Amino acid sequence: MLVFTNVFSSYSVNDLEKAKKFYEGTLGFPVTQTPEGLNVQVTKDYSVFLYPKPNHQPATFTVLNLKVISVDAAVDALVTAGVKFEHYNEGELKTDEKGIMRGGPGKGPTIAWFTDPSGNILSVVENPPVRNG
């Protein structure tokens, strides 16, 4: 059996300087630059490694989901920071004027998507606190 000491994800970007500014300045994550790329410390126990790729092609799917208590509050804060949210109107994938897909029973989570400077898709997804009683 394999023994893992930690886990992390990685994906490419086309400009490390712009990526560092976005992930550190706009999203507020601690970022460490290494000779190979950027280590983005998303949580205490989880990091994402961004590496430069000259022929970078952004993924056509969400590469990083950020759980938040309120998608509305997260969208408002990120819009103030200059982030533009994606708008969809395809089949069951429909977002409102803020770029939020409203979830609920049988509909999935409340979620909103945006891209980093390299076009990689990220999301804020609502994860409200569990209330007992």
Image (cartoon, grey):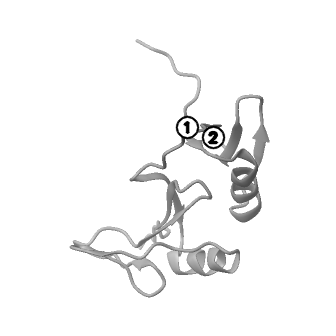
Residue pictured at 73% horizontal, 60% vertical: 28
| Residue 72 versus residue 27 in the image, above or below | below
Of residues 90 and 48, the one nearer the viewer is 90
Residue type (three-letter) at the residue carrying disc 1: Ser
Residue pictured at 44% horizontal, 49% vertical: 59
Q: Quadrant of the N terminus?
A: top left
Q: Which mark is residue 10?
A: 1
Residue pictured at 57% horizontal, 74% vertical: 84
Residue type (three-letter) at the residue carrying disc 2: Leu
Q: Which mark is residue 50?
A: 2
Q: Do the CB atoms of the residues marked 2 and 1 lie less than 8 Å apart?
A: yes
Q: Quadrant of residue 68?
A: bottom right
- On the image, the x and y values in percent for residue 53 come to 60, 37
Q: Residues within 10 Å of mark 1 (few under 14, many from 20)?
A: some
| Residue 23 versus residue 127 in the image, above or below | above
Check disc 1 and report its element: helix, strand or loop.
strand
Residue located farthest toward the front when viewing the structure as drawn: 55
Residue pictured at 68% horizontal, 80% vertical: 80
- On the image, the x and y values in percent for residue 125 come to 46, 66
